[in-house]
Image (tube, grey):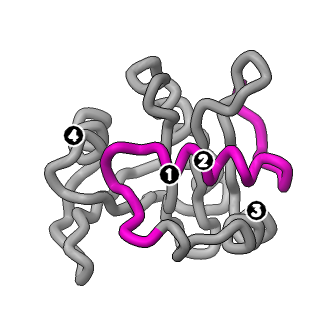
Amino acid sequence: MIRKAIATDVPRIIEIRGAVKENQLSNPDRVTAADYQRRLDNDEMWVWEEDGRIRGFSASDTRDGWIWALFIDPPYEGQGIGQALVAEACARLRAAGYRVATLSTEPGTRAEHFYRRNGWEAQGLDARGEMVFRKTV
């Protein structure tokens, strides 16, 4: 069900990113299809595909140890897809030599609670006001 994302997945990835109820982009035009393609070319991006349809995606940057995306299509939240995708992102970082993964999310969200429940340790707020988390991978 998890596979590496490819260029033809970008429209669905954008659709999922735009559908989330929390951690929404303040300006959806800020992240373009070309931005996602650059990420596909330079980072590790994975999708959860079920019945021929992408239900969520995760992405990690093996250049700096950050997980920069974990988004699930809202009707499919709570089914373990996020846990599987974040585990894949962490595994890729570990394979690249990292022992700790870092990510950030909007404070007070379900995402913050998700990370806390799954063993991520809060490090405080960054300059943008997002909660930074770290976890040994």
In this rendering, position of residue 113 left or right of residue 83: left
- The image quadrant of residue 116 is top left
Asked whether disc 1 touches disc 3, contact meaning CB atoms under 8 Å apart, the reply is: no
In this view of the protein, which residue sits in the foreground, 29 or 53? 29
Helix or strand or loop: what does disc 1 sit on?
helix
In this view of the protein, which residue sits in the foreground, 72 or 86? 72
Magenta stretch holds residue 65: no
Q: CA distance from mark 1 to mark 4?
A: 21 Å
Residue linked to disc 4: 113
Residue linked to disc 1: 18
State which tag comes first along the sequence, 1 or 4.
Answer: 1
Magenta part of the protein: which range? 1-27
Judged by depth in the image, the label closer to the viewer, 1 or 3, is 1
In this rendering, position of residue 127 left or right of residue 34: left
Where residue 97 sits: x, y (%)? 62, 62
Is residue 69 positioned above or below 82 on the image?
A: below
Type of amino acid under label 4:
His
Q: Which mark is residue 15?
A: 2
Magenta stretch holds residue 21: yes
State which tag comes first along the sequence, 2 or 3.
Answer: 2
Residue linked to disc 3: 40
State which tag comes first along the sequence, 3 or 4.
Answer: 3
Q: CA distance from mark 2 to mark 4?
A: 24 Å
Helix or strand or loop: what does disc 3 sit on?
helix
Instruction: Report crowding for label 1: few under 14, some 14 to 19, many 20 or more residues within 10 A (C-alpha).
Output: some
Type of amino acid under label 2:
Glu
Where residue 18 sits: x, y (%)? 50, 51
In this view of the protein, which residue sits in the foreground, 63 or 30? 30
Judged by depth in the image, the label closer to the viewer, 2 or 4, is 2
